Image: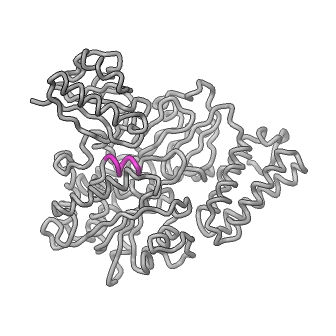
Amino acid sequence: MSIKVFVPRDSAALAAGADEVAAAIAARAKARGIEIELVRNGSRGLFWLEPMVEVATGAGRVAYGPVDAGDVDALFDASFHTGGAHALKLGLTEDIPYLRKQERLTFARMGVTDPLSLADYEAHEGYAGLRRALAMPATEVVQQVLDSGLRGRGGAAFPAGIKWKTVAALQASQKYVVCNADEGDSGTYSDRMTMEGDPFMLIEGMTIAGVASGATEGYIYIRSEYPHAVATMTQAIAAAEAAGFLGDDILGSGKSFRLHVRKAAGSYVCGEETAMLESLEGKRGIVRAKPPIPAITGLFGKPTVINNVITFASVPVILAKGADFYKHYGVGRSRGTLPIQLAGNIKYGGLVEKAFGVTLRELMYDYGGGSASGRPIKAVQVGGPLGAYVPESQWDIPLDYEAYAAVGAVVGHGGIVVHDDTADMAGLARYAMEFCAIESCGKCTPCRIGSTRGVEVIDKITADQNRPQQVKLLRDLCDTMVNGSLCAMGNMTPYPVLSALNHYPQDFGITTPDRKAA
């Protein structure tokens, strides 16, 4: 009987040498006459341990990591293929504290299954949600999503069920489901992990959205820098079609839904839903004025459900286990779990799925182990390059959409980028303005011109050129961008700028209290 050995195929693991490790394990096993079944699974999200090799034993899966190709001979000498002792042995995978303390609902299969095995997916509760959805009226499917409290995980946090209900209520010759997988925020990778490590979950979630809304065509708009995600999703869609989970007669239900992959245009602003639609239509990615909203006039002018990867990926478990099960997790109006991504100057970077309500302090120290540099942590940017810098005084606020909004911060896509006490906050604020100037689609003046002026004004502040007046000008400029920009690109760029200015004035050369900071 062959022994199952798991080596991740996730991009992070590949970058750390996973292919070389897999090849070495296969070669050494053959040379030693040991029969193994090599499974290329997704990553568990413990990136400092990649490549993390696992072996199936009678007691459960045993992990070793980080493994280098040069370690393989010694691992076989130690009988790692039967769970033997070695310096790299981490014990039972499920008992690793970083994993054990999580609430993995969306990421329950991540690293457990072969991403392209439908049999593996179904053996771990895959497609239970779609089967249940096909057995109930479309209105009830929408109601389950509404009752679960699921909100868009892309950043805006708009209730997903309301979008679905709006599209479902409209009469149209064609409706669409579009997944925004143009994951461009700094420190984020949960979308990539999903597409590479559990692609059928995304396919199932989008199919349920199609069934619920009456849409028969779907598109996944994948970031161009994600070639492995593009390849995996393409293969998974073909497998799902061949098995009857996509196509003209899904599982004999008479319902139709087809899915297509489209590579993104390499533009940050195409992560904004209307710019993404323009790009999908073959045009330049420029933000559309709203109204009309995409749910009514979306792709090719038709009603369109647009959600991001994690939103759709959260749907199968809601349909499989019920809205009440899902909304049991979380706090306030922030229900369920969020795959949180720890990055930047952090000792143990990786993915942590927790129910809403966890704090930054818990995430950074209980999971992240503090800064990688060993120096005190100074600031944490939450929510991507346009998210606010959160000071230590706010690290105990529960991760919750409303609680963060109350202090001028955003949860966003769940990306957390850590900076130690050597960080120059004025320089980081300047970068936010410069980033906006480079990535702006140019359609609206506050974003296009405001970001360019913002760089100039911050330079004058740090050079002490009429500093008090320039600080006032910067605040006025930010106010104009927040209230006058067409989309989040312009109206969120001030978040990192103002939070840096308010909480770290000394980095701007400001020594006297700024009355407006309060």
Give residue 70's position: percent from left, percent from top: 36, 23
The residue positioned 35% from the left and 37% from the top of the image is: 44
Residue 115 visible here: yes
Residue sitting at the far right: 466
The residue positioned 9% from the left and 29% from the top of the image is: 1
Q: Which residues are magenta?
A: 191-197
The secondary structure that most of the magenta stretch takes on is: helix
Give residue 63's position: percent from left, percent from top: 30, 27
Q: How is the image coloured?
A: one colour
Q: Is residue 406 left or right of residue 49?
A: right
The residue positioned 35% from the left and 39% from the top of the image is: 43
Give residue 18's position: percent from left, percent from top: 35, 35
Q: How many marks?
A: 0
Give residue 175's position: percent from left, percent from top: 34, 77
Q: Quadrant of residue 34?
A: top left
The residue positioned 69% from the left and 66% from the top of the image is: 448
Pick the front one: 404 or 475: 475
Residue 354 visible here: no
The answer to whether residue 352 is magenta is no
The answer to whether residue 194 is magenta is yes
Residue sitting at the far left: 1
